[in-house]
Amino acid sequence: MKNLITFSAFILLLMSCKGVSKQEENEKMITQFFEHFNRHDFEKMANMYVENAEFKDPTFGIGIVKQSRLQTIQKYKALNEVFPNIHDEIQNIYAAGENNVVVEFISTGKAVDNSKLELPVCTIFTIENGFITKDFTYFDNFEESK
């Protein structure tokens, strides 16, 4: 009987570790994603996506847009030309089930015209088979009227 209880406890431990492990693995992957972004290594960052990932982003409009890795690199290189020191500071990371990670972060930078960027952003990443398949990003895209 003691062996059965020990074996059952071992199985339960393995099952609970597997679920936590997947979430921790996804959170670690997304943390690495932001490290690549902050080093402006957009090639490594883009290689974390599937070849044609789905994006929701106010800069693309309201629908879902598929982007290749090359298009993702080009988008972030263009952003980096406007904000050469752009940096994302993670505020919170939340595991949302087995395949999703939600990240709240602040994007900051100084544009070439000396204007400053400080933008709160929230992104929901979907991760499948070790790659980001969806990147749904939300932020206020309206400019303040002067």
Image (spheres, grey):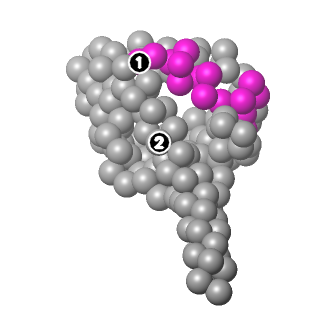
Mark drawn on residue 40: 1
Q: Residue furthest left?
A: 114
* Residue 52 highlighted magenta (yes or no): yes
At horizontal 62% and vertical 77% (from top left) the residue drawn is 3
Q: Which residues are magenta?
A: 40-55
At horizontal 59% and vertical 83% (from top left) the residue drawn is 2
Earlier residue among tags 2 and 1: 2
When the figure is inspected, residue 5 is found, relative to residue 68, above or below; the finding is below
Q: Position of residue 127 (x, y in %)?
A: 65, 44
Direction from residue 18 to residue 40 in the image, left or right: left
When the figure is inspected, residue 13 is found, relative to residue 104, above or below; the finding is below
**Three-letter code, disc 2:** Lys
* Residue 28 highlighted magenta (yes or no): no
Screen quadrant of the C terminus: top left
Image-quadrant location for residue 71? top right
Q: Residue furthest bottom?
A: 1
Direction from residue 61 to residue 115 in the image, left or right: left
- Can you see residue 139? no
Mark pair 2, 1: CA separation: 18 Å
Discs 2, 1 touching: Cβ within 8 Å: no
Image-quadrant location for residue 119? top left
